[in-house]
Amino acid sequence: MSLKSIITLCRPGQWVKNLFVFTPLFFSGNLLAFTPEIHAVVAFISFCLASSAIYCLNDLKDVSYDRQHPVKRFRPVAAGEISTMQCIVIMLILAVISLVLPALLLKGEEALQSCLIIAGYIILNIAYCFRLKQIAIVDVSVISIGFVLRVGIGGTATGIELSPWIIIMTFLLALFLALSKRRDDILIYEATGERMRRNVEKYNLIFINQASTMVATVMLVSYIIYTVSPDVIGRFQSSYVYTTSIFVLLGLLRYMQLAIVYAKTGSPTKVLFHDRFIQLCVIGWLILFSIIIYF
């Protein structure tokens, strides 16, 4: 077992998903405040460790399926680089540290609630690995709830009350990405007959395409309603919040193009890291919203 194999097992490239922890801080206008920022960093690190522990469990549970997958067969457990017992030990260490960290570095209700959210995330994903991932629609819903929990711990750790809008938008965005990822499994199944997931037969391209379009539409409409809401305009003291909608629309269109035309949405993280169009949409959205909030 090499250090490289351990790092690969933890999938640090996937930690970018945990940046959702910082969204409450960003939208509250306190991103540059020292104490809340430190608390958010603690929550971020804790969630990274917890998610890595779940990746270990997922690799243990799906090792037989991963060995049939054209990409996943190179994962450390599937490739035999890390044994089952070694993976279990690493998983337990990561899970324990993820719970101990906020308990030690945060205080009072922030520490307690953050630990409860981490514990809830771990329990939910254990249920996902052993049963819920086999139930169509429930599987993608659990993934979406996991992103809501990331936002939740970001608010809890910093003492920021969450807006219903941020919860709704986070859930919808995560659901859209999860559906797009399922599309990749369907394409592999239809091309090779190999079942990358046990519930792959409960989906098909027509359903995924229509469901993705529906979720994307609801998300875009919800976002536009959010940007023109009098409460939001008053909170940000700007009537130009709606201008950020252009980046959301273009980003959604590009992601759907990658999914439907190019079939390249097997990994949303890789899309973010490699697709320049998506990157420009995210950067443009961040810059414009930062100007509205902080300047």
Image (cartoon, rainbow, N blue to C red):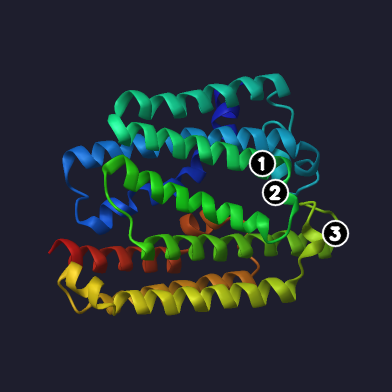
Q: Dot 2, crowdedness within 10 Å: few (<14), some or many (≥20)?
A: some
Q: In which quarter of the image is the C terminus?
A: bottom left
Of 113 and 289, the residue lying toward us:
113
Residue 190 falls in which quadrant of the image?
Answer: bottom right
Residue 277 seen from this side: yes
Position of residue 240 relative to residue 49, above or below, is below
Residue for point 39% across, 74% down? 223
Q: What element carries label 1?
A: helix
Mark closer to the observer (3, 1): 1
Position of residue 156 relative to residue 270, above or below, is above
Q: Is mark 3 on a helix, strand or loop?
A: helix
Of 108 and 197, the residue lying toward us:
108
Residue 132 has which mark? 2
Image coordinates for residue 197, horizontal then vertical, percent: 76, 52
Q: Is mark 2 on a helix, strand or loop?
A: helix
* Amino acid bearing label 2: Leu
Residue identified by numbered label 3: 192
Residue identified by numbered label 1: 127
CA gap between label 3 and label 1 equals 29 Å
CA gap between label 2 and label 1 equals 6 Å
Q: Earlier in the sequence, mark 2 or mark 1?
A: 1
